[in-house]
Amino acid sequence: MRFFVTRRHLMELVGGFLAIALVVAGVWFFVQRADQDGTTQPPAGQPSASASPTGAPVTPPPATMTFKVYFH
């Protein structure tokens, strides 16, 4: 059986590739964003941020940030 490449077959192939690439890029984007938000768990074997080496709980940093703004 001979395979004839037509314009339609080529467009279906390119469209499928682009759809897969878009899904992979979207998953990668959300995974990277979750890493930046700090919502991912630390790898096994590493202590979590909620416990210090002495066993006492660590106080999280304040949720607000103070900075100075100068207007000219």
Image: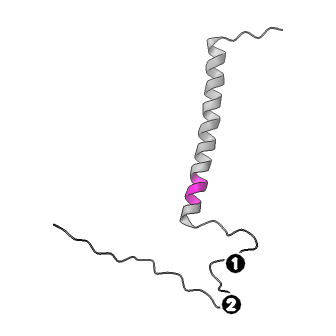
Q: Position of residue 38 (x, y in %)?
A: 57, 67
Residue depicted at x 65% and y 86%: 52
Which amino acid type is marked by label 1? Pro
Classify 3 as above or below 56: above
Classify 38 as above or below 64: above
Q: Secondary structure at mark 2?
A: loop
Q: Position of residue 33 (x, y in %)?
A: 55, 57
Q: Position of residue 1 (x, y in %)?
A: 84, 8
- What secondary structure predominates along the stretch shown in magenta? helix
Which label was assigned to residue 56? none
Classify 26 as above or below 63: above
Q: How many marks?
A: 2
- Span colored in magenta: 30-34
Examine the image and state in which quarter residue 64 appears.
Answer: bottom left
First in residue order: circle 2 vs circle 1:
1
Which amino acid type is marked by label 2? Gly
Examine the image and state in which quarter residue 72 appears.
Answer: bottom left
Q: Verify whether residue 45 appears in magenta.
A: no
Q: Position of residue 47 (x, y in %)?
A: 69, 78
- Residue bearing the label numbered 2: 55
Examine the image and state in which quarter residue 46 appears.
Answer: bottom right
- Tell whether 67 sits left or right of 26: left
Which sits in the foreground, 52 or 27?
52
Which label was assigned to residue 47? 1
